[in-house]
Amino acid sequence: MDESNVREEFGVNFPKPMSFYNTEVKHKNENENKSEEDSYFPDFLQNPKHGQFELKVKEEIKGIAEPIQIQDDIKCKKELEIKEEPIAFTGDSYHQRISTDIKPYQCTYGDKSFLTNSVLIKHQKTHTGKKPYQCRQCDKAFSFISHLIIHQRKHTGEKPYQCCQCDKTFSQNSNLIEHQRLHTGVSSYQCSQCDKAFSKNSTLINHQTIHTGEKPYQCSQCDKAFSLKHHLTYHQRTHTGEKAYQCSHCDKAFPWKHILINHIRAHTGEKPHQCSQCDKAFLLKGDLIKHQRTHTGEKPYKCSQCDKAFLHKGDLTKHQRTHTGEKPYQCSQCDKAFSASSALTVHLRIHTGEKPYQCSQCDKAFSLKKNLINHQRTHTGEKPYQCSQCDKAFSASSALKVHQRIHTREKSYQSSQCDKAFSLYSTLINVQRIHTGEKPYQCSQSAKAFSQKKTYETTDNTHWE
């Protein structure tokens, strides 16, 4: 194999003939008689396509190549070393190009240029789509052998890069470098439009799209566009229905990896997000953030039409419907509509008669969980709601609110047919029936009807005495 073949196979550009470098490659601890040609090309380089490797060209001031790591499928596994003699550079050298910023190798597909021909050849693979390095354990292929090596660690579980400050290990050196910035606090990549800084350049690039509003990734099946490529990839699965992430514990599959990870935690019981102020832990980071607001009192979601603020965005959305009057949740069995889906769910139990909340101490059941909790206090005698102005306590918060109106003399319920106001909603309803003449309680033993339930029950009992 001569110099021209090396140039063609690896894209190596030598400014001087090969013999100029006087570079000798030989096996350690082994004396073998090699020809002059073999001294430049070890046995496994005679047919470079036989093994999975790549000749890596470095600065010509340091030599032709660095030691090559031999893969398992190459027969010769002995460590190689490169011996080199000092070189006096003349003419157009790599070192001089760095000093002058000359990039003589121009990409024919675009406007990029490069210092060396080898880097140009690698770059051109991004245009040609050529992926000669195939994984033997799955169907993935790669343009560069270094990408294949990193990918294979997913199959082997190998993580050769160890953090010197903690016990974490990584499959890629770049991930280790990013991790170490957590220890040092270094954020190397500063946004030019705000004061935020990032440990990764890719994160900075993603952040800058917030300022520019740029969304270069367009869905081919709808009019949606995205600022990040992986967001487009995720979105496209809504069209294809692809569910690439399979749970190993059950038969469920998911379109996104993070949903699978959260689902697996439901099997394992893992709750990795621990509150620093109490002993609660959460499956999702978002749930931890919401919980922490109960400690800080933060209510970041403010209503634009009144002075109310809320812990959760969903609560703000529900509240805003009190201003707009919107009731998007329609009952399928009657003409009632509701501003919240939870209210519709509760209402539907009127039609179905469902009472899913069963008391464990008696045979009573309830359609609402809060009603079951209040009922259970009749068994335990618990009265957790204490009046701040007297010594009375109540088993339900609603009972405490009604009681507090005795102290405040608040009368929130105004009759629309007279000037009277009442502290209880039930009292208002009874008074309105006097105006309307409505008597909804019919005696089963006589033709009498009553406007108030209490009067009806008293009269009905007299038939059985």
Image (tube, rainbow, N blue to C red):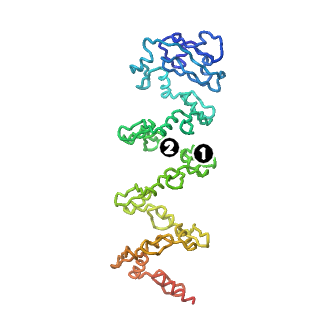
| Quadrant (top left, top right, bottom left, bottom right) of the C terminus | bottom right
Amino acid residing under circle 1: Gln
Residue 107 vs 429, above or below: the answer is above
Residue 105: horizontal and vertical position, in percent? 44, 20
Residue 436 vs 396, above or below: the answer is below
Residue 291: horizontal and vertical position, in percent? 48, 55
Residue designated by label 2: 234
Q: Earlier in the sequence, mark 2 or mark 1?
A: 2
Residue 287: horizontal and vertical position, in percent? 50, 53
Residue designated by label 1: 246
Residue 70: horizontal and vertical position, in percent? 61, 24
Residue 106 vs 220, above or below: the answer is above
User: Quick check: 8 left or right of 310?
Assistant: right
Residue 201 falls in image quadrant: top left
Residue shown at the point (50%, 26%) measured from the top left:
125
| Quadrant (top left, top right, bottom left, bottom right) of the N terminus | top right
Q: Residues within 10 Å of mark 2 (few under 14, many from 20)?
A: some
Residue shown at the point (51%, 45%) measured from the top left:
239
User: Quick check: 74 left or right of 404?
Assistant: right
